[in-house]
Image: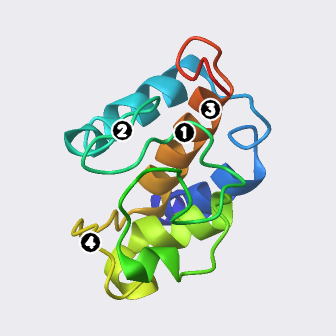
Amino acid sequence: MMHLLRQAVLPLAMFAGPLWAGGLTPSERQAGAELYQRCQGCHALAYDRTGPRHCGLFGRRAGSVEGYGYSQAMRDANIVWSRQTLDRFLAGPLKMIPGTTMGYAGIAEPSQRALLIGYLEWASTSATLCPNQ
């Protein structure tokens, strides 16, 4: 029973706890980096690939990286990327923005999304990983 309770509470705690306070533990950062490897087929932190760069993601309006060729659906989405909007998007990109060209099915597990978002938030503040931010 305690195991089931931990499974239900962990994802919620990750949104309220140190993960979002900029206090990723080394193991959380590593887990987030490992999850980010799934993204690297199309994305990079500091430069555009098939998908747009992730440096500067938080607080940026969806579809707004200068020079990147977004789908019309993404340009029209009227979303500003935050922990909450990114969590919804990563849970089901095509559900949140029908017509997006991001054909990724999403990440079903809330705790994995929280780790990935925490890593992206941490990486965005790294002068080494995101030198032009």
Given contact means CB atoms under 8 Å apart, are the residues at marks 4 and 1 in contact?
no
As drawn, the residue found furthest toward the front would be 67
Q: Nearer the viewer, residue 51 or 114?
A: 51
**Alpha carbon separation for disc pair 1 and 3:** 6 Å
Residue at numbered disc 3: 124
Pair 2/4: label in front: 4
Indicate left or right for 66 with 9 as reference.
left
**Other-residue count near label 3 (Cα within 10 Å), few / some / many at <14 / 14–19 / ≥20:** many
Residue 125 or 26: which is nearer the viewer? 125
| Mark 4 surroundings: few (<14), some (14-19) or many (≥20) residues within 10 A | some
Q: How many marks?
A: 4
Sequence-wise first label, 4 or 3: 4
Q: Which residue is mark 1?
A: 120
Which residue is under mark 4?
101
Q: Residue 74 at x, y = what percent?
A: 45, 75
Identify the mark at residue 4; answer none if there is no mark: none
Q: Residue furthest top?
A: 128
Q: CA distance from mark 2 to mark 3?
A: 13 Å
Image check: 41 left or right of 48?
left
Mark 2–mark 1 contact, CB under 8 Å? yes
Task: Look at the numbered disc 1 and give the secondary structure of its residue.
Answer: helix
Q: Is residue 133 left or right of residue 48?
A: right
Q: Which tag is nearer the camera, tag 1 or tag 3?
A: 3
The amino acid pointed to by label 3 is Ser
